[in-house]
Image (cartoon, rainbow, N blue to C red):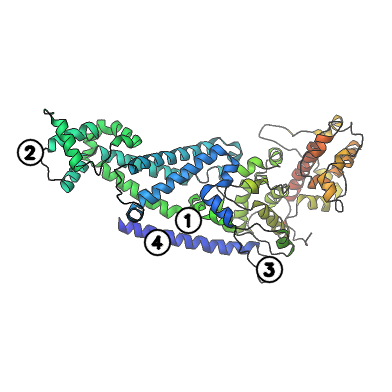
Amino acid sequence: MFDALYISLIILILGLVFQLHRFKKGGQFFKENKKEHHTNTFFQVKDFALNSFFQTKLFKAGKIRWGFHFFLFLGFLYLVIVHALHGVTSPVLFDNYDPTVDPYQFLRNLTGVLVLTGCAAFLFRRGFNNRISQDKNVKYKGVFSIILILLLVLSGFLLEASKIISEPVFMEMVEDYSDLDEETGLLDLKLFWKNNYNVVFTKDIESFPNGLENGRLLNEEYCLPCHSNIKSAFLSSVIAKTIATQGKALNHYRIDKTFYVIHYYLCLLLLICLPFSRLFHLLLIPFASSRKNLGLDTFLENKAFINIASLYACTNCGYCSQVCSVYPNFQITGNQDVLPHSKIESVKRMIQNPGTDNFWQLQSGNGECTMCYNCTDICPSGIDLQSLWSVLDKKLNTMGYADNSSFIKDTSLKEWTKKEEAYIRLSPGDELTSDLADRAEAFEKCIQCTICTNVCPIVEYDLNQNDITPHQVMNLLRLGKKHLATRTRMVWTCLTCYSCQEHCPQEIRVADILLELRNCGSVSADLIKQTQKPIRLINR
């Protein structure tokens, strides 16, 4: 078994080296100028400490989910440090450690139950979370790692339960720690352990007068310093009672040794899979949390890039998609790359195979982002998603994938009009989305009071570049110029803050109409672009 351990450790080390090499190589993908590029080496120590150990970002996302995840983390950490590595940690941390005494016996069962509960909650959420389950490639990511942990902990409980009922294990302890035999009270000790520790013996043990009392005294003398009452092992003792009905057969085949081998090799498999599975995020989350966010000056100096190691800190939890301000766009277009947690997977594929796939869909999904920072603020892994989307937009542009707004403006009006009426399906069997922009009653009450324009943050802060204001978009619709409205900058820069809609005295759904126009324009643009090859563009 030691050979298997050494082989597993070698594979673990080689896997870590491989991943570091892959991250370094893949990181070049986002570097525009290798000579002028300077890596940002500043770290956020506070965020590193709080998010790595106390998972503050996850706490912000949801208190109940944080509870499940945090106690799973604590439970697994305890099992690794105190149980799996007891040969190393017990001499340093504990004076008299023994796995069969309390509080260690109780804590091992308690932390094991916490891990099992956390794993079950993860699987349940993956099975019923609609936003995650939209993309099957994302839905099942991490499931293997959770199932592996689940099997590891279950095998541990089965191992402990099988040792509780094992007569061979009992006799080994008697031989090692006492000089008892049948003439000096061994039968009395067996009777006591049968009644109080659920040991299953091959031969029936007769009860003699004062036998149990004598067995109790012998237990106190020889066993009690190393064996607490098994009731504290609340789950293992229940499993032991359940399998005790077949105890004689299980003891005959030494099922405890079988469970030990299974448990041991599951531990080694966990080590081997660490660099190649979702478990690797345990090491990458501290890294992602420590990175300082990219600033405006970094982008202006063309030094912005993303360290792809932080991308692999993503656990596909879906929190970012739940708060995404343009999630309604996904409901309309069905483009998975609108959702941040799905978009990260597409970015990984793009880095791995930049010239083999068509990334118009990724460009379209990323173009929907309004830079609201909701995803970055809530990301439990601490990934600077907002910087990622900005860098990605620039990279796609240099690869020839123009954003939909620029693409529409560069498309002839004749060609654009042909695709204007493209159907958009919400889901199989459903027809088109809302048709606010096509129904006169939705906007005909507009009196051009300009209140929507006066409260619009885009008009205020983007006045020099904006071409048309919200009330003017409504006027274009009244003139029957929907195809022109979809080509305006206002439609594509709208933050969907809903200030215009909330303040409209005529209760016109201004923001909903702008969003619908953008979605219709995106779908139409996507239909055209899918048939075209990327054209390398000059910086816009």
What amino acid type should be assigned to the residue bearing mark 2? Glu
Instruction: Tell us which disc is closer to us: 2 or 4.
Output: 2
- Quadrant assignment for the C terminus: bottom right
Marking on residue 376: none
On the image, numbered disc 4 is attached to which residue? 10
Marking on residue 33: 3
What amino acid type should be assigned to the residue bearing mark 3? Asn
Q: CA distance from mark 1 to mark 4?
A: 12 Å
Q: CA distance from mark 1 to mark 2?
A: 57 Å
Quarter occupied by residue 520: top right
Q: Reading the chain from its start, which is encountered first: label 2 or label 3?
A: 3
Residue 377 locus on image (x, y percent): 64, 47
Q: Is residue 329 visible?
A: yes
What amino acid type should be assigned to the residue bearing mark 4? Ile
Q: Is residue 456 placed above or below 387 in the rendered structure?
A: above
Marking on residue 275: 1
Q: Reading the chain from its start, which is encountered first: label 1 or label 2?
A: 2
